[in-house]
Amino acid sequence: MSDAPVFHIDLCDFHDDPYPALAEMRARAPIAQVPELGATLLTRHDSIFVNEKRTDIFSSVQPDGLMTVLMGENMMRKDGDAHMTERRAIFPTISPRTVRDVWLDRFRAATGRVLDRLAPRGQGDLVADYALPVAAEALRVITGLTNMSNAEIDRVSQGMIDGIANYAGDATVEARCNDCTASIDRHIDEMIPRLKVLPDHSLLSVQMRAGLSDAQIRANIKLAISGGQNEPRDAIAGTIWALLTHPAQKEMVLSGEVTFAQAFEEYARWCSPIGMSPRRIARAARVEGVAFEPGDRAFLMFGSANRDEAVFDRPDRYDVTRDNRASMAFGAGPHFCAGAWAARALVAEVALPMAFERLRGLHLAPGSAPRPVGWAFRGLTELPCRWDAA
């Protein structure tokens, strides 16, 4: 373990709201050893921005890491040429052109079908009834697992992200994660013969045509589902919640003074759906006065970077007019989120504007007070709302 100053946290409090502890770390011990997480945390924006790129020290290669053990060695757990080879292989699926020309119309059509069912009801949970199926419908076509139901997409995604954040070693969580990855493998097995006959732009199809190994293909599909469901789901529901609880800013968006894209980017900064990225220390090094040893575990706390007072004015405030160019909501450097273009299109161009257009008079259900939870992954568990029945 590094010789960074020790900073203790209460795991329950940290899960409920990590931001007070992270702010204290930034102020007192910006690189801090947190025994409860078994890791050394980097919490300041500029430090993370620089060190995320130093893969010779902060390596993504983690043979014994939870993600590798539970999901296989995907491209996010590789550096250098190995990472870039797989990133190039999947580019035909998630390029800006493919998102524009192939996926965007399918996103709109699927979201329209969800709203056709939902709008007449006049009430619902916009996590379970809207954000979940919208994100899952998009992910089914992008991954190529069109044989997997929306509910199963969400179940296996949640099971995997719970598994890779299971630093407390809960055996039940690990078993559930293993069940989820087995389900994905079964669905992949079923789709491979179909896509050999009828190839398409999906992640499964383009990896097969690129000649990636079976292990690479499966690990990258699991990666896409683990982040490609929960992050858009949480961003859709979270941005709606942020706008409903900040009515003046909602009016700025609905009037066109600012865009839905700005509202989404600010939410992703303010309440980062993916709050951290783990790294393995590859060689002995001293970083900002802290000595790291090979094999040490470090967490790059993107959620903390996005609330760094040295970079963002009044960072704990949701402000749709904010300049978010320094945000690390999608990471930074060589491991910048490969699905960022697809996520931005789905959330900002489709899910948000269509929700406010179709669900007239949208407001929180009386008496409800939803709020996000989580620190490695953060999002709402429910969003009870009402609107004018169509």
Image (cartoon, grey):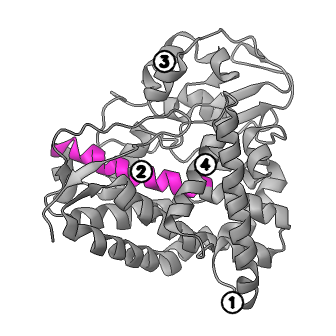
The residue that disc 3 covers is 21
| Kind of residue at badge 3 | Ala
Q: Secondary structure at mark 2?
A: helix
Residue shown at the point (35%, 76%) measured from the top left: 113
Contact, mark 4 vs mark 2 (Cβ under 8 Å): no
> For this view, does 224 lie left or right of residue 230?
right
User: Which secondary structure, mark 4?
Assistant: helix
Q: Secondary structure at mark 3?
A: helix
Q: Which residue is mark 2?
A: 235
- Foreground label between 4 and 2: 4
Q: Is residue 236 magenta?
A: yes
Front residue of this view, candidates 97 and 154: 154
Quadrant containing the N terminus is top right
Q: Nearer the viewer, residue 43 or 311?
A: 43
* Image spot of residue 344 (x, y percent): 45, 60
Magenta stretch, main secondary structure class:
helix
The type of residue carrying mark 4 is: Gly
Q: Name the N-terminal-most of marks 1 and 4.
A: 4
The three-letter code of the residue at mark 1 reads: Leu
Give me the C-alpha separation between circle 4 and circle 2: 18 Å
Query: Neighbour class for label 1 at 10 Å: few (<14), some, many (≥20)?
Result: few
Q: Could you tell me how far apart the alpha carbons at marks 3 and 1 are, in whole angstroms?
A: 51 Å
Q: Quadrant of residue 288?
A: top right
Q: Is residue 384 above or below residue 225?
A: above
Residue under numbered circle 1: 198
Q: Residues within 10 Å of mark 4 (few under 14, many from 20)?
A: many
Query: Which disc is residue 159 wearing?
Result: 4
Q: Are marks 1 and 4 in contact (CB under 8 Å)?
A: no
Pick the quarter of the image with the C terminus.
Answer: bottom left
Q: CA distance from mark 4 to mark 3?
A: 27 Å
